[in-house]
Image (cartoon, coloured by chain):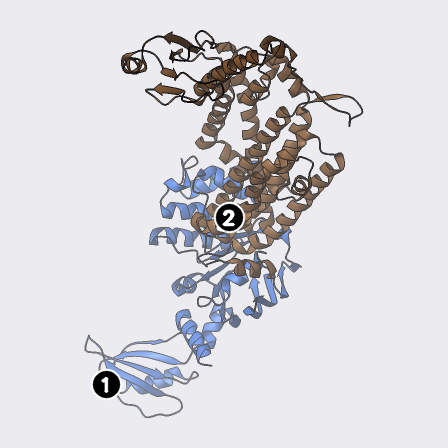
Amino acid sequence: MALLTVQNITKYFGEYKALDNVSLDVPEKSIFGLLGPNGAGKTTLIRIVNQIYFADQGEVLFKGEKINTGHIANVGYLPEERGLYKKMKVGEQLLYLAQLKSIPKDKALEQIKDWMIRFEMKGWWNKKVEDLSKGMQQKVQFIATVLHQPSLIILDEPFSGFDPVNADHIKNEILKLREAGTTVIFSTHRMESVEELCDDIALIHKSKLVLEGQKKVIKEKFRDHTFELFHRSPFEISDNGGLKLLSQDKTKELNYQSIIHLPDDDINAALRQIADKTEIISFRERIPTIHDIFIKEVTQNDHE
Amino acid sequence: MSKINLIAAREYTTRVRKKSFIIMSILGPILFSLIMVVPIWLATQEGDVKVVEVVDESGMFEGKFNETESLKFRYIDSALDMAKEDLKTGDFYGLLYIPAIALEQPEGIKFYVEKNPSLEVISSIEANVNKEIERIRLLEKGIDPQALEAAKSRVNIESINLAQGEEKSVSTWAPTAVGYISAFLIYFFIFYYGIMTMRGVIEEKANRIVEVVISSVRPMQLMMGKIVGIGGVGLTQFLIWVVLSFGLYVVIVSVFGLGGDPSMANNVATTEAMQSASDNGLSSEITKALDSVNFLQIGLLFLFYFLGAYLLYGSLFAAIGSAVDSDQEAQQFQFPVTLPLLVAIVMITAVIKEPHGPVAFWLSVIPFTSPVIMMMRLPFDPSLWELVLSMLALVGGFVFTTWLAARIYRVGILMHGSKVNYKTLARWFTIKY
């Protein structure tokens, strides 16, 4: 079931169409990647979901209901342009932000303590934010986002500003949150984190949705039936029944690497044919990465 | 509503705990009470005794000058040149030289000094000389100067206001002083706390926390919470000032034994007051004059106009803050917003001259100038309908500016790094969000 449904959203800023009839479903308890180049409209869409902007057309449904201010406590939002009150103490700040989400004070205090232990932040309560390192500030910021136990968390470029260790830490927390039943939307340029974390993805380009669905389905769709083959000696092959040699190069290890196109239904037959001609070292399908798909879709759209 | 409270509470507590607030709260009253006390203290202090040597070649003035505690005359017989020499070494203040003069044309009188004399000394000497010449002239015309003196009349008119159905004694200097001070306080507070609001918005924008917050509350709530919270800081500061100033004044007065009626303490004793009441019954006249000012009414209306003016200007300052990225950038927009306030301050003199004239009326109704001007007019008892009209206009005014500011604010706070001009603001104002 979809936790969040975006239906035919169109948004203008003056003459400029920031979003053009965008629809997508974010399934419950999944990690949803919102991808797209700079200026595609990702942040605008996220702001509409957060009710910071209002759409000109279309609507956003949260658990089947039209989204309204009552849902704010159910959403945690980490904007790309993020920050904290520098002069405020960590504890007070987290308490304040939680109370803004309508969390009662005592419950908020309890939650903050839990999270501080989890993030190894004991003794930070009375530290001013300006005295913390950037990575530490990001941790506080992350806690502020998830503190009120929202069922939907929206993270805009969550890993910017983190060193690899802390980024890993956050990554694990995101996975834990999903385990606990939270739905996560995150927008990013970093395709390797999408590859690693996302269950579903959507690609927005030039204000339009160009791709949406389960990551594995999309990958399947973008399979081009090419395979990578390492072998001892060069060989030649004549086109028959779809089997095609696309390239063949000598590698540094004095072996050969060939890219071949194979008919989907009979890989074994093709392999047998090749095995007669050379010794096969390794063989695997070239599955497109999200990165490849992203580049392909974006450049293809640019040429249109 | 509770979220506005929450935001206002944060704005309030973080600012009230700041060192600058505490310092301002303590320094303000010290300055105020010094302003109140120092003139009185100076007035009661005796200056150095100034001795003036007189070389009188006319022989008309010896022993005729009135001496005061600070100004003494010594009549000498030496020649002018010698007396001049003496001035360089002597311990006297100056040398008055009166040549042999004709009564019809008394000319050539000179005052030699080592340091430039004060206006007070010169006019005192001139008065003495004039008085003696006049006396001699009168005698020559056969008029007894004492008879003339006895015939002089000194009338003191007491103004009585009948408007309230009862007779009420009215003073002019007391309302002027009270009006002046409250008008300036309003001006100062709007300026100070308006700019504080603007800085607060710029800070939130620069910190990039604003988007985090407005995902929880509406931009309008954030803006109003900030304005209300900082307004509360202003009010607190004002109350601290009133209480501390009063306390300090009482302490200083009793410690230094400056005397006077203690009821004077909560009012303002200006030098003007000292002068107008210098002749008879100083303290009773001051008390009477201040009685003609309704302090409770003025106090309550001060709070109303302070809050109204602050809301009106505060929201405009918030809008400016939202549109820019730094204080420097804010300056270009600050001037047009503060212009009406400056106009109000400049027009105060005109209002004092004609507290019920058309200029005073219109400026006290237009919400941008009314807080300052109405505070000035208030002690002169403007009619009730004028006051009601002015108050309603102010309420309408801040509803209008808040609405206007909110439309700019909601767009501005999410805009970073863009150069903003009035055209951009107009576009933000009309854009659908």
Q: Nearer the viewer, residue A114 or A102?
A: A102
Name the residue tied to disc 2: B335
Q: Tell me which corner region of the image, top left, top right, bottom left or bottom right, holds residue A108.
A: top right
Q: Label 1 lies in what chain?
A: A
Question: Left or right: where does residue A278 sit relative to residue B2?
Answer: left
Q: x%, y% of residue B283?
A: 61, 13
Quadrant the N terminus of chain B occupies: top right
The chain in brown = B
Residue type at mark 1? Pro
Secondary-structure class at tag 1:
loop
Q: x%, y% of residue B214?
A: 55, 50
The chain in blue = A
Name the residue tied to disc 1: A234
Q: Tell me which corner region of the image, top left, top right, bottom left or bottom right, holds residue A193.
A: bottom left
Up the image or down, A172 lies above or below B163; here it is below
Question: Left or right: where does residue A147 sit relative to residue A254?
Answer: right
Q: Label 2 lies in what chain?
A: B
Q: x%, y% of residue B52?
A: 38, 12
Residue type at mark 2? Phe
> How far apart are labels 1 and 2 at the CA level?
80 Å
Q: x%, y% of residue B215?
A: 55, 52
